[in-house]
Image (cartoon, helix red, strand yellow):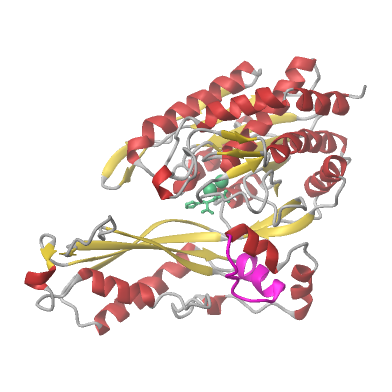
C-alpha cells in the first residue's frame, strides 16, 4: 500500500485514541486571558512539548519574558518550538498553532462542563473549550506524526513547529521571537522554511472545506470612566453626582450603529468600496443566509443579501462591544453606582487599516464625545493589543497543495475564503520569513469557537488529521 494510504488508514483505525488525547488536552484549562489560569497555560505547554518529544520531535521552550495583565506582572507562557527532519531534498514546512484557549464557565450557558470533553455519539460532536480553537487542529498534527512514527514511514517534508500560549490575548512576545530567529537566517530555528501552514480557523459553512487567504487585523480597546472614590448608594447620590456608568454607556453607544457602520470618523472611510467584479467573488462562495442563521442560532443576519453579509465579515472592518468591567451584573437588584467602569470593544481591521492608524482616531473621537457630556468624571482610553490584517497569494504552490489534499480527502474542491477573525502572527511569519502562509482549517462554521458549547465534529477531527498529512504529501510532490 502506498505511504499516504497507509497513513490515512492508520488515522481511521486510531480515531478513539486520538479522541482520548484530545480529552487530555481539553482538561487543561489553559486560559491565557485569566491570570489565575496562568499555571494551566504553562502546564498545557509542557504537555504539548512532552507529546512532541515522544513522537520524535526535537523541541525547546522559549521564555518570552513577562507582561502586565490586570495590574499584575506575569510570566508569559513559553513558545514551544520543534523540528523534525533535515533532508535538503525535501521542502520545509513551518506549522503554527496555539495551545491557549478563551475563558469558559459552565455558568456562561454551557450544557456540559467546558473543560471536560464530551463525546456526543448521537451528533458526532466533540464538545469542550479548545476542541476546535485550537487544540483539535494542533492535535491533528500530533496524529500525523504518530501515524508516521508507528508505521515507520518517512515524513514527506521537513517540519518545524511554533506553538504559542498567548494567541487569545495578543500573542505577546511572539513577534520578537520570530524576528530574532529570522534575523539568524539559516542558523535560526526557522532557517530554510519554504512555507507556513496554520490550522486555526473554520469552514464558512458545515459542508464545504475551504482554504483561507486573508485575515482581519485587530485593535482592542479598554475605555474607563471613573469618578467617585468608592461605589455609592444610588438613593443617596443618584442625580447628585456624575455617574461613570451613565457616561460610559453613552460613549459606547456612539461607537457603532445597529446596522454595523462604524461611527468613529475616518475608520470606515479608510476602506474602498468593493467593485461589482469583487462582489461576484463572494457570490460564488458556498454560503447562504441560512448558514449564518444556523451558526448563530437565530434569524439575525444584518442583510438578506449573501455577498453583503460575507463582505461584512471578510472584506470590511467591524466594531464589536464586548463587555463592561466593574458594572453590577449579578442576580438581584443591587442599587449601586459603580465607582469605575471599563468598556471593552475591538475593531476588526482590513487592508489598508492598521492598529497604529486607527488608534488616534478612536482616542480623539472618544475624547471629543466625552467633552460634550460636560462630565466631571475622568476618561482613560487604552489600546490593549492589536495586529495588522493579512492577505496571501492563493496561486502559490502551498495553496495548490492544500487544494489537492482537500480534493483527495473530501472529494470536494475547497472554497477560497477570507476570515473575519485575527491571527496576528500570520503577517509576521509572511513578512519576517518572506514565505507564503496557508490557512488550512479543520473545523466547521458552526463550531462555536469563543462561544458556549464549542465543538469539533469527530469527522472533522479525523478527516482533518488526514487532510493535514495529505497536504504534507502534496507539498512533498510539488515541483515549484
Ligand atoms: C481565528 C483564531 N482562531 C482566533 O480566534 N483569533 C482570535 C485572536 C484574538 C485576539 N485577541 C483576542 N483573541 C480572534 O480573532 O479573536
Ligand atoms: Zn485560534
Ligand atoms: Zn480563538
Instruction: Give the percent coordinates (x, y) of residue 149.
Output: 73, 17
Instruction: In this rendered view, identify the residue nearer to me: 449 or 233.
Output: 233
- Magenta stretch containing residue 170, yes or no? no
Q: Position of residue 22 (x, y in %)?
A: 59, 30
Vertical placement of 125 versus 263: above or below? above
In this rendering, the answer to whether 289 lies above or below 126 is: below
Q: Is residue 93 left or right of residue 242?
A: right
Q: Is residue 85 above or below residue 411?
A: above
Residue 367 x, y percent position in the rendering: 30, 76
Q: Which residues are magenta?
A: 297-316
Q: Is residue 84 visible?
A: no
Image height check: is 452 above or below 8?
below
Residue drawn at x 28%, y 71% as measured from the top left: 248
Residue 311 among those drawn in magenta: yes
Q: Nearer the viewer, residue 393 or 290?
A: 290
Can you name the residue that lies furthest to the right here? Answer: 1
Give the image quarter of residue 65. top left
How many marks on residues?
0
On-image quarter of the N terminus = top right
The one nearer the camera, 7 or 336, is 336
219 sits left or right of 153 in the view: left
Where the C terminus falls, by quadrant? Answer: top right
Q: Position of residue 128 (x, y in %)?
A: 54, 39
What residue do we see at 63% from left, 78% from top? 272
Amino acid at each position: 500500500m502506498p505511504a499516504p494510504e497507509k497513513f490515512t488508514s492508520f488515522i481511521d483505525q486510531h480515531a478513539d485514541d486520538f479522541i482520548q488525547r484530545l480529552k487530555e488536552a481539553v482538561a487543561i484549562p489553559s486560559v491565557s486571558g485569566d491570570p489565575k489560569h496562568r499555571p494551566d497555560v504553562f502546564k498545557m505547554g509542557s504537555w504539548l512539548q512532552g507529546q512532541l518529544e515522544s513522537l520524535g520531535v526535537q523541541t525547546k521552550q522559549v521564555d518570552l519574558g513577562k507582561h502586565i495583565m490586570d495590574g499584575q506582572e506575569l510570566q508569559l507562557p513559553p513558545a514551544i518550538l520543534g523540528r523534525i527532519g533535515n533532508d535538503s531534498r525535501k521542502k520545509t514546512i513551518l506549522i503554527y498553532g496555539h495551545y491557549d484557549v478563551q475563558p469558559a464557565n459552565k455558568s456562561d450557558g454551557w450544557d456540559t462542563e467546558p473543560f471536560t470533553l464530551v463525546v456526543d455519539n448521537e451528533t458526532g460532536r466533540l464538545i469542550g473549550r479548545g476542541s476546535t480553537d485550537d487544540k483539535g487542529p494542533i492535535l491533528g498534527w500530533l496524529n500525523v506524526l504518530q501515524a508516521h512514527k508507528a508505521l515507520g514511514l518517512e515524513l514527506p517534508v521537513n517540519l518545524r513547529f511554533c506553538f504559542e500560549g498567548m494567541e487569545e490575548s495578543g500573542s505577546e512576545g511572539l513577534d520578537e521571537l520570530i524576528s530574532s530567529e529570522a534575523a539568524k537566517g539559516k542558523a535560526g530555528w526557522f532557517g530554510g522554511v519554504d512555507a507556513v501552514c496554520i490550522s486555526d480557523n473554520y469552514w464558512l459553512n458545515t459542508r464545504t472545506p475551504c482554504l483561507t487567504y486573508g485575515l482581519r487585523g485587530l485593535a482592542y480597546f479598554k475605555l474607563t470612566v471613573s469618578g467617585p472614590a468608592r461605589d455609592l448608594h444610588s438613593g443617596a447620590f443618584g442625580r447628585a453626582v456624575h455617574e461613570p456608568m451613565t457616561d460610559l454607556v453613552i460613549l459606547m453607544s456612539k461607537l457603532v450603529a445597529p446596522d454595523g457602520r462604524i461611527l468613529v470618523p475616518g475608520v470606515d472611510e479608510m476602506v474602498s468600496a468593493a467593485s461589482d467584479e469583487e462582489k461576484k467573488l463572494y457570490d460564488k462562495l458556498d454560503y447562504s443566509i441560512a448558514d449564518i442563521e444556523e451558526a448563530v442560532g437565530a434569524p439575525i443576519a444584518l442583510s438578506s443579501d449573501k455577498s453583503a453579509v460575507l463582505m461584512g465579515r471578510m472584506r470590511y472592518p467591524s466594531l464589536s462591544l464586548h463587555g463592561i468591567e466593574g458594572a453590577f451584573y449579578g442576580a438581584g437588584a443591587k442599587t449601586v453606582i459603580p465607582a469605575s467602569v471599563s468598556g471593552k470593544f475591538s475593531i476588526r481591521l482590513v487592508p489598508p487599516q492598521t492598529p497604529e492608524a486607527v488608534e488616534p482616531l478612536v482616542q480623539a473621537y472618544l475624547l471629543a464625545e466625552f467633552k460634550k457630556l460636560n462630565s466631571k468624571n475622568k476618561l482613560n482610553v487604552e489600546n490593549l493589543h492589536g495586529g495588522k490584517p493579512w492577505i496571501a497569494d492563493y496561486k502559490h504552490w502551498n495553496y495548490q497543495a492544500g487544494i489537492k489534499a482537500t480534493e483527495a480527502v473530501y472529494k470536494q474542491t475547497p472554497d477560497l475564503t477570507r476570515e473575519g477573525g485575527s491571527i496576528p502572527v500570520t503577517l509576521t511569519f509572511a513578512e519576517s520569513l518572506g514565505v507564503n502562509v496557508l490557512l488550512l482549517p479543520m473545523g466547521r462554521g458552526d463550531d462555536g469557537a469563543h462561544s458556549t458549547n464549542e465543538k469539533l465534529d469527530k469527522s472533522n477531527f479525523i478527516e482533518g488529521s488526514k487532510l493535514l498529512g495529505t497536504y504534507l504529501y502534496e507539498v512533498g510532490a510539488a515541483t515549484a
